[in-house]
Image (cartoon, rainbow, N blue to C red):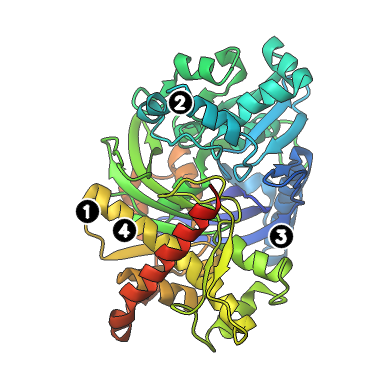
Amino acid sequence: MSEVFVLSIDQGTTGSTAVVIKMGSGSAEVVAKANVPFKQHFPQPGWVEHDLGQIWESVSQAVSIVFRRCKELDNAFSAKLISAIGITNQRETLCVFDKLSTLPIERAIVWQCRRSAEICEDLKKRGFEETIKSKTGLVLDPYFTGSKLKWLMNHRPEVAAKIKSGEALVGTIDSFLIYRLTGGRSFCTEPSNASRTMLFDIHKGDYCDELLEMFEVPNRSVLPEVKDSAGLFGVTNGCEFLPDGIPITGVLGDQQAALAGQACFSKGQAKCTYGTGAFLLLNAGTTCPSSANGLLSTVAWRIKGKITYALEGSSFVAGAAIQFLRDQMNFLSDSSESEAMASSCQGSPEVYFVPALTGLGAPYWNPHAKGAFFGLTRGTSKQQLVRAGLEGIAFQVNDLIETMQSDTKIPMTSIKVDGGACSNGLLMQLQADYTNLEIDRPKNLETTVFGVSLLAGLGAGLFNDLSELSNLRDTDKVFVPNKVFDQSREASIAGWRRAVQAVELFSR
């Protein structure tokens, strides 16, 4: 095929990124990218909100900046050269917006928000936990969209009235962006996002009436239509920063997009993304997997009506742990300093940090857990605490990997990694040492936008099938387990497990 340009929008938890990728026969090259952060809102302890107006503005600015950078590189570039748009996004975050104006009605309730913990506990007491898990593949936790919506319906009567009357629409970030980009002409989502709402039956591939009633959704019309992950979602209309008529042809939740960006298109391939949290996904093929140990069954993508499933393990705090040590504890002035600081000392088995700053994810699923340091003495240094922060991330991911191998009986020899925190070489070496697996880091760390760009190219007809996309990923470095670490690995992991047990005991 001749060279074409694809615009990918990555609407993340802390900022929005726009990337222009030039695609040709057997190649995909990042031309330029731009990131615009936006404010995080914490109105109460455990609550996390985003202003959808600020999110939309950050997307607008990021796209405008990346186009300007493309123009600076090549004066012949024009936004009219964009052949397709891909969207990837933070998942589970609840958005409510006006059907007519497309404007937000309420702040978004972010996936990290724990305000609906009591709703989840009540549903457990009423015996709904197993029904929810069997239909959705999810554990009953405030992480997911459904309980957030139920909380909104119970605590925001004016918003609830608009939802019931059909004046307001509800969805995840992708559906909000599609609605705004198309000027209110397309209200849709796709299965990787829908499967995170706790309203979607992943076996039937559709919303479930029983779940809609359970979470107080008045009718299906307030929810977005579920389309294939690659295909036409609509065309741009009425956006100041984009020409009209550009097709949106690929949409994936951020972790599924990273799975695609890592070319994990075959059953048994796995990746871990180190972003705000850490997310381990395994391609489970066309049969829905199950977990006896708190992992999630979810949809990777749906192509031409055929669902590919994934098994997922999530730890809520990864890169956010280093941000916490930087911003709240003032241990370092920039996150990039963490590698050099931590390399100068030893952490475990002396000092541990359990970064349960927004509860514990898989395999523990304890929304009430709080973060804690263990093993502190008068001689503990700031450098040790930073190293303990990095090790806490690696320990959490090791828990996920061990659980996934136990559930699937699929032996792993390597994990593909991505996300901002994987640029930290010490963290990646620690990960290899604690898991005793090879850690494969790609040249292109923007795997989330890269993955949805591939799906957008597929949806626009630039590629024929997924097999054509597999050779577009290149390895930068493979981190190999240090044999010297063999003797201390078990002791370090045992100390981590005792620290987690203490955190869970304190949360009761």
Whether the residues at callouts 3 and 1 have beta carbons within 8 Å, the answer is: no
Identify the element where label 2 is drawn.
Answer: strand
Q: Nearer the viewer, mark 1 or mark 4?
A: 4
What residue did someone put label 2 on?
200
Q: Residue at x 61, y 34 (%)?
A: 116
**Residue placed most toward the observer, 140 or 222:** 140
Per the model, the C-alpha gap separating discs 2 and 4 is 28 Å
Residue placed most toward the observer, 323 or 256: 323
Q: Position of residue 91 (x, y in %)?
A: 55, 41
Spot the residue most to the top.
Answer: 165
Circle number at residue 71: 3
Q: Secondary structure at mark 4?
A: helix
What residue is shown with label 1?
410
Tags 3 and 4 in contact by the CB under 8 Å rule? Answer: no
Gap between marks 3 and 1 measured at Cα: 47 Å
Q: Tell me where residue 216 sits by quadrant.
A: top right
Q: Nearer the viewer, mark 3 or mark 2?
A: 2
